[in-house]
Image (cartoon, rainbow, N blue to C red):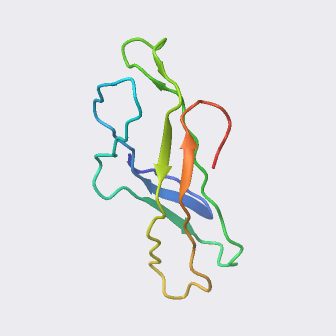
Amino acid sequence: NGPTGATGDITIDNLTSLDFDKVKLTGGAQNVKNIVKDPNVQVTDKRGTGAGWNITVKSSEFKDTTDSTHILKGAQINFPVGKVVASDSTNTAAPTAKAITVPADGLDNAQ
């Protein structure tokens, strides 16, 4: 959470963790919101080629912090379309954002 210290031509400079706080399971479908204010991902592309880049995300299983055999099956994380802000007015093509749904199943299903 926060600055990553990454170096290179393309870097993820800042990354905000998600926090769903404590949730009491009811046995039915529930929608739980991230309680972190202003979550963000900051990327820097120093190449200057306009070749583009992508960010992908995947999730581990949602496990009880005191008993890892208790796994929340069927959980998913929905990311709405984010707001893309360029800090450099010389961008030739603005990045695009899209909504994604990430299953919290621990499989290699990066979105």
> In the image, residue 65 lies at what x, y percent?
38, 19
Q: 29 or 22, which is in the foreground?
A: 29
Q: 35 or 101, which is in the foreground?
A: 101
| Residue sitting at x 61%, y 82% | 93
> In the image, residue 60 lies at what x, y percent?
54, 31
How many numbered markers are drawn?
0
| Residue sitting at x 55%, y 67% | 97
> In the image, residue 89 lies at what x, y percent?
49, 87
| Residue sitting at x 28%, y 46% | 35
**Does residue 15 appear to the left or right of 53 in the view shown?**
left
Q: Quadrant of residue 87?
A: bottom left
> In the image, residue 4 lies at what x, y percent?
45, 50
**Does residue 97 appear to the left or right of 15 in the view shown?**
right
Q: Quadrant of residue 53?
A: bottom right
Q: In the image, is residue 15 above or below residue 92?
A: above
Q: In the image, is residue 89 above or below residue 47?
A: below
Q: Residue furthest front?
A: 28
Q: 13 or 80, which is in the foreground?
A: 80
Quadrant placement of the N terminus: top left
Q: 30 or 108, which is in the foreground?
A: 30
**Does residue 78 appear to the left or right of 110 in the view shown?**
left
Q: In the image, is residue 41 above or below residue 33?
A: below
